[in-house]
Amino acid sequence: MAHPWWHNVVVYQIYPRSFMDSNNDGMGDLPGIISKLDYLAQLGIDVIWLSPVFKSPMDDNGYDISDYEDIAPEFGTLADMDRLIAEASKRSIRIILDLVVNHSSDEHPWFVSARQSKDSPYRDFYIWRQPKADGSPPSELHSYFGGSMWELDEATGEYYLHQFSKKQPDLNWDNPAVPEAVHAMMNRWLDRGIVGFRMDVIDLIGKDVDRGIFARGPKLHDRLQAMNQATFGQRDALTVGEAWSADTEEAKRYANPNGNELSMVFQFEHIVIGWDPEHGKWKPRPFNLVELKQVFAKWQTELHGQGWNSLFWNNHDLPRAVSKYGDPGHYRVRSAKMLAIALHLMQGTPYIYQGEELGMTNVQFDSVDDYQDIETRNLYAERVAAGHDAAEMMAAIHENSRDNARTPMHWDASEQAGFSQNQPWLKVNPNYREINVAQCLEDPGSVFYCYQKLIKLRKAHDVIVHGDFELLLPDHDKVFAYLRTDPTNTMLVCTNFSAESVTVQLPEPLLNRQGECLISNLEERTILDNNLTLAPYEAFVIRWEKTPE
Ligand code: GLC
Ligand code: CA
């Protein structure tokens, strides 16, 4: 059976406001992206996931859409969007858009009308409930961005539901007019030339509010199947569902190979194991490699042949990988490459978040006022008011704030990192003079060229895309090593996640056989000794042709 085209692609995520500013207003934009397409072509990526560029009051940087059919003026125009699609296509790059349909903006005409009167034809596009007898919200639910999930609408005397900010009212998917409108909108974008969607918090659209079920609601999969049939199902699209709640069983439903829902899931089990079970990301737990390996191995083996996963360390909501899992001080370049190698040789579709290919790091602003992210600001205010220690909150922000990923892209060593000639909407990371695209392109040993090579390897070696996975040394707390095999190849991936040298014993059949070093971040290795000593953050990959027995 022919495999879908998106099995061997690499996706690059662009956060438009931070990528490239073409008109020096401090805000990235579509013409800015177009001007950097040659750079992306040089990296070798196949698909761009474009974070939202639609009209929006930008309460959550565009994840609050007030017009799904138009572009936010700060980002450009529909004509710019058409040009982006065409210019990308000339370079064999396809574009997927961020589909944010769990909620809209409160400034979307649907909501503006809905809140005007209970008789509005759009009233039922949103989720309204009566106050309790004492006037308080219908339930105690807490929104992700702080405060209640319910907001009182004074004019009509009812509360509306918002799982995120109060400017992001949840759409009512129980009303058939909602999917109908969403599907029509999706088809218009597909007709315009995009090849699919990244689906924002898509696991929330099947909710059953009165039973308190939000993620993985009872109607979720029916709704995805209906969406598939009404829109991208016949179009050979790439669709990826953001699903914080997915376990492997659930993922097999979303991304089942018969293709009646989505192409793949984007799930976070490897991320949330680093968070406190009760306090979440604002109380990070120490990194535990053994646990991380268990999670990776589980997803690799359970989805093999039965689903399709995304591979990522980073996105616009997460801290920078090299700061989280590597050593941004002593071994920045080496550990960034190690992380890339460890991730990209597994099965699934790799995602690179802008700047990851340079080894960009977290930022540490002294004042919370320098942070722009609504989640960071709201949660800081809420928790400090509730008695949490402010210094501890700042430390958690330095570690996990979403703005770590959102500081402007580093293009060169000039003022504002070559992102803009003006003060950007969010300050640049002060380390841009050492870490930037111009520097990376000049240095053959840069993180950039490691990513470039990994993308090429995925196209050249089917064992990376479809081979079996076997975790080696499962209990080792510093080394992540695995095998990928198919009928003609064995590939060993061996990575040291620590700043110490470590000596390990690999399984006997791998020893003393001459192989090909596909990639490494130190010297090449082509043969393994009995006792293999790995340097700090070393990573290498050897491939052997399977010799017939
Ligand atoms: C997703 C997005 C995040 C956004 C949220 C609400 O998790 O990735 O950036 O704030 O949904 O739309
Ligand atoms: Ca601009």
Image (spheres, helix red, strand yellow):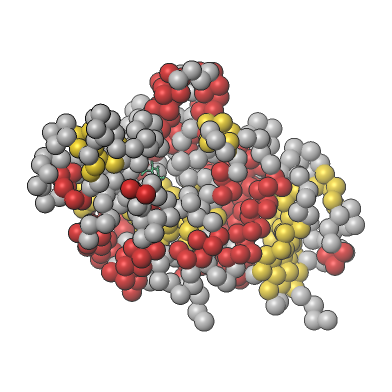
Quarter of image, res 109: top left
Classify the position of the C terminus by image quarter.
bottom right
Residue 142 visible, this orientation: yes
> Camera-side residue: 548 or 60?
60
Which residue is at 49% across, 23% downward?
A: 365
Residue 418 visible, this orientation: no
117 on left or right of 205: left
545 on left or right of 307: right
192 on left or right of 434: left
Image x and y of residue 238, in percent: 41, 64
Up-down relation of residue 367 to residue 226 (above or below) = above
Image x and y of residue 351, in percent: 50, 53
Q: What is the tally of numbered marks visible in this picture?
A: 0
Which residue is at 60% across, 40% downward?
A: 274
- In the image, farthest residue toward the front: 133
Up-down relation of residue 140 to residue 380 (above or below) = below
> Camera-side residue: 43 or 386?
386
Image x and y of residue 386, in percent: 45, 20
407 on left or right of 79: right
Image x and y of residue 115, in percent: 15, 40
Which residue is at 71% across, 63% downward?
A: 470
Which residue is at 39% across, 44% downward?
A: 15
